[in-house]
Image (tube, rainbow, N blue to C red):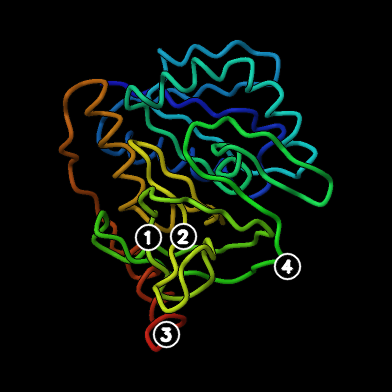
């Protein structure tokens, strides 16, 4: 069995170690004896979404996001059909913002793709922190690092996780637990980077299993020895979140 991973515009959207997410997916497939093909697309390439099983959309500067979004609007319908058909997407930071309707910045509005019902507004101060999330989708807490000026409002969509330590979306009602990111169909949008997946094998396997299920009808993944990853995860949780809240 084979999965094809499309990395969109890594020359423009790779501020936060997104290639580490690609390598993590690839290795965890190969360690299970599964084939992985990675296709990198530049701004002028034609993207055949029907041939892709996972799409990674990373983060970049506001200027680079404007360039990318101008191009993505030309292929928005194909991208939207992929998402609505259950295509797997990991969108990080700027890529997360581009999933929504718009991102209002001090330099003007960056029009999004409206693939997910959300929007982002620039805020102050910039939110910089280690972060720990809880989610019913994952057996272990999700850990990462956030560094974003945007405040993303996800409406009634499901969050990626609730914040045990850190900031997150900052769109919660006072007195309620703050949330971070979004899950829509098989799309995960998040501000967590560093990169995200090597720190969180549960999240990586969540994406891989959904992609395998869509392409091959197989969702059960052979267990891997994640003892080192989980030890690192437990250390981060203990250091930052054990006394939070």
In the picture provided, is 69 more to the left or to the right than 92? right
Q: Calculate the distance from the C-alpha at mark 2 to the C-alpha at mark 4.
A: 17 Å
Could you tell me which residue is drawn at 47 percent across and 50 percent down?
A: 154
Q: Is residue 240 above or below residue 61?
A: below
Mark 1 vs mark 2: which is more N-terminal? Answer: 1
Could you tell me which residue is drawn at 41 percent across and 80 percent down?
A: 241
Q: Which residue is mark 3?
A: 244
- Residue sitting at the far right: 107
Q: Quadrant of residue 114?
A: top right
Mark 2 vs mark 4: which is more N-terminal? Answer: 4
Instruction: Report helix, strand or loop for mark 3.
Output: loop
Q: Which label belongs to residue 161?
A: 1
In the picture provided, is 144 more to the left or to the right than 210? right
| Residue 139: % across, % down | 23, 61
Q: Which residue is mark 2?
A: 180
Mark 4 vs mark 3: which is more N-terminal? Answer: 4
| Residue 61: % across, % down | 75, 45
| Residues at discs 1 and 2 in contact (Cβ within 8 Å) | yes
Q: Please tell me how crowded label 1 is: few (under 14), some (14-19), or many (20+) other residues with Cα within 10 Å.
A: many
Q: Is residue 34 above or below residue 130?
A: above
| Residues at discs 4 and 1 in contact (Cβ within 8 Å) | no
Which of the two discs, 4 and 3, sits closer to the camera? 4
Could you tell me which residue is drawn at 58 percent across and 46 percent down?
A: 119
Front-lying residue, 5 or 180: 180
Q: Calculate the distance from the C-alpha at mark 3 to the C-alpha at mark 2.
A: 16 Å
Instruction: Report helix, strand or loop for mark 1.
Output: strand
Q: Calculate the distance from the C-alpha at mark 3 to the C-alpha at mark 1.
A: 16 Å
Instruction: Report helix, strand or loop for mark 2.
Output: strand
Which of the two discs, 2 and 4, sits closer to the camera? 4
| Residue 133: % across, % down | 39, 66
């Amino acid at each position: 069995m084979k999965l094809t991973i499309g990395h969109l515009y890594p020359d423009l959207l790779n501020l936060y170690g997104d290639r580490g997410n690609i390598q993590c997916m690839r290795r965890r497939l190969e360690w299970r004896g599964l084939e992985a093909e990675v296709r990198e697309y530049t701004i002028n390439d034609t993207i055949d979404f029907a041939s892709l099983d996972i799409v990674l959309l990373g983060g970049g500067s506001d200027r680079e996001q404007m360039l990318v979004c101008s191009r993505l609007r030309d292929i928005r319908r194909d991208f939207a059909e992929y998402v609505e058909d259950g295509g797997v997407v990991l969108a990080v930071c700027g890529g997360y913002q581009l999933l929504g309707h718009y991102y209002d910045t001090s330099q003007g509005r960056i029009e999004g793709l409206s693939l997910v019902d959300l929007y982002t507004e620039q805020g102050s101060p910039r939110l910089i922190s280690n972060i720990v999330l809880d989610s019913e989708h994952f057996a272990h807490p999700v850990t990462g690092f956030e560094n974003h000026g945007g405040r993303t409002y996800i409406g009634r969509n499901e969050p990626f996780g609730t914040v045990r330590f850190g900031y997150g979306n900052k769109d919660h009602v006072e007195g309620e637990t703050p949330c971070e990111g979004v899950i829509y169909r098989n799309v995960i949008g998040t501000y967590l980077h560093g990169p995200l997946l090597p720190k969180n094998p549960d999240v990586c396997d969540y994406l891989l299993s959904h992609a395998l299920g869509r392409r091959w009808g197989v969702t059960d993944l052979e267990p891997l020895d994640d003892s080192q990853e989980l030890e690192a995860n437990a250390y981060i949780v203990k250091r930052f979140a054990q006394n939070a809240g």
